[in-house]
Image (cartoon, rainbow, N blue to C red):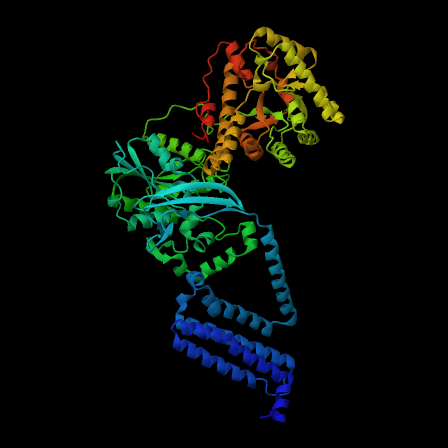
Amino acid sequence: MAASPAFDELTSAPGLRLDVAAASTVIFSAVAPVFVLAIKGQNAGAALLAGASAALAAAALRICASSAVRTSTRFRRALLVLAAGQAAVLAVSIAALGVAYVNLDSLHDERLYFHLLVTVPLGLGLLELALALLPPTLRANCIVFLVLWIITELIFGRLLRPVVEGEPRSLMQDTYYRSDSAIGYGLAPNNRAVHVKRLGTRQVMSASYVIDGFGRRLTLPYAADGRSNFLLFFGDSNTFGEGVNQSETLPYQVAQLAPRYHPYNYALSGYGPAQALDLVKSRNLRMEVAEPQGLALFVFIPPLIDRVRGGSLVSAGWGRHFSRYEIDGNNQLVRRGDFVHSRPLMTLFYYLVSCSNVAAYFGLSFPRAVTEGDLDLTARVLAQCQRQLKRQLNVSGFYVVLAPARTGEPLISRRLIPYLRAHGLSYLDLTDMFDAATPGYHLPDQHFSPVSDRLIATRLVRDLEIGAAPAPDPLDPAQAIAPMQVAVTVDDLPFDAPHLNRERMMAIERNIARALKVNDVRESYGFAIGIEAVKFPGSIAALKDWLEEGYPLGNHTYSHLGLSTVSAAEYIADIERDDQFLNSVDPAAAPLQKRRFFRYPYLEEGDNLEKREAVRDYLLRNGYRIAEVTIDYQDWAWDDAYLRCIGEHNTNAVQWLRLHVLDAARRHLRRSQKLAQLIFGRDIKQILLLHLSTLNSLALQDVLKAMRIDGVRFITLEEALADPVYQIDPKVVSSGGRTFLSQMSEARHLKDPYLETVYTEQMLDGICQTTN
């Protein structure tokens, strides 16, 4: 049937077309929510929403019936009808599903349904109200603001740096974590897992975990001979040992030093004081702990306060099912359920903040400050944990261990101390033991490294008096040293690497030069071997680049000869040949060669006194100065081990080497200072020996930074050699190379009491050695 002319005229009116569009939009916007409610079994709600939408659609066709109403007024009325439609969707959904539906769990578990029933109606409704009611200027400003905010989010999304991330993967079961109604989550028992973390696409960490039948990380077998006491560990990922292997965790390290105690690791990544309390309340520890008596430790770091109060990063993330504890009107600690259900709107707001690239870039989190109430609540939770433990087990002591903190954090930890005392808690203050931000004390993801675990374990055993005190280690990196002046020198330029192309050799050289510059090292001499440059012509560019970086070159003989293997004449001829080579590298750099320095290859100065004196006399007559060495942590042996492990794809060993080389460097720093004080009765200006190597290209920046934190000021080689001690000729010979301090010890008939016993050459030689 043809439409009547009257109907055509009616629907062609601009205002009425707007009303028809509004009515259609109201109906269509309700279709999806109606279906969602029906799918969820809320038939009454679906019917109510369908009826309300139909009524609003009819209203939209009538509200602008008068032709006298202006188009702008019709537009605002249409927007109000649309806003009413969105309000109807929201109101009916909440009425049908309950107010409790609006929480972070619903968003995570039913993302599409939640957005259709809550997010979209709320967002569109507010937008339509704003467009209908705000003045044109303010409305335009709001639109501009929204557009600018979207652009800002996109820009900051591109500026975000990649972070170290990766979750454990179970090797035996379908899952690694499991839900726990009392605690939030726990570990699947009787499990093994591998944990690989990456920075972008590059793997930076790998560790394996063994989980026992009670969902704890295994420390020792249950039948631990001679261990009559238990030692319970509670805490977070640092105590659990995230990123480190079984024999590197804090509980394991304590077990090696306290033979009468059997440590149990109840810590887990993400846990805090409330989870320790919930764990103790919900578990029968008498069935899980074999020994009759013992101690309990809670290892505390400042971020754990957020896990008690429900900070935005916790309650909107992994900890949304953590218990929410409060102090009630009777001044008693009470549990109010979990964060996601006891304060749903706040956790939803926190979640929205966490989705922002701008917030992520600036590290924005809420609450911004730690209050006295937060500290009191944390102490009360720990005190309740102590009481619950003592109801189950014969616990002779419960200690809150204030772990070594990062720069600025000790103040937060110490603010907790008065509250610990007020609630009858004992504590151990380890906050100043070392700066956890120092390279070597943390993994790439900022968790404690095995070095930190070892140092903390030693301190705990000593302070708790639960084991034989280890012999004092004079080279302990945790031991403070007096300020030192150190010149940095680099041997074996250009890089001897036939397996690398020119670009890779240049990258290694530039990484080392960059590490020197970042740490304010001036005029670091690079001692060059001419024959290596002849064998690999592309490496000449690396030498020229070294000079362009402002670092001079020194003589290391042309063929890298050991003086014990050739005559003095052959050795001197090789020095002269290398001198000619150096002058040919870049004639424009000749002024740098006026200050001529020579470094003995292998630090070997001859196997007889006659040969030694002949070479020294030649060097003196020809204007050379001998670049002595006082600090040598055998970085070449570390690099050999590193390359072997890379070849074997042994990620764990590679990670271990990169972490522990910092520890070795700091130990040798202390060794050289103490040995110099023993020999000369004072501190001297020291000279550090390094090599151009793959490992140094990756780790040197952190090594030098750690030295600076220890109190080292880097000086030039010329400044170091101005120390009068270097005018002394020890006049000792050896078929092997030795540092200046070792030679002086022999010359003065002193026994060296500071020999390295931890990171020996023999130990390094055994790493990643394939056994046939």
Q: Position of residue 625 (x, y in %)?
A: 65, 16
Q: Position of residue 85 (x, y in %)?
A: 51, 76
Which one is in front, 235 or 8?
A: 8
Q: Is residue 214 visible?
A: yes
What residue is shown at x 60% (from left), y 12% (from top)? 566
What residue is shown at x 47% (from left), y 23% (from top)? 761
Outermost residue toward the right in this view: 588
Figure disc tally: 0
Which one is in front, 163 or 286?
A: 163
Quadrant including the N terminus: bottom right
Q: Position of residue 690 (x, y in %)?
A: 57, 26
The answer to whether 490 is drawn above or below residue 436 in the figure is: above
* Picture quadrant of residue 718: top right
Quadrant including the C terminus: top left
The answer to whether 31 is drawn above or below residue 354 in the figure is: below
Q: Is residue 435 visible?
A: no
The answer to whether 616 is drawn above or below residue 511 in the figure is: above
Outermost residue toward the top in this view: 610
Q: In the drawing, does residue 111 fall left or right of residue 210? A: right
Q: In the drawing, does residue 295 fall left or right of residue 81? A: left
Q: Position of residue 676 (x, y in %)?
A: 53, 17
Outermost residue toward the front in this view: 772
Q: In the drawing, does residue 374 fall left or right of residue 484? A: left
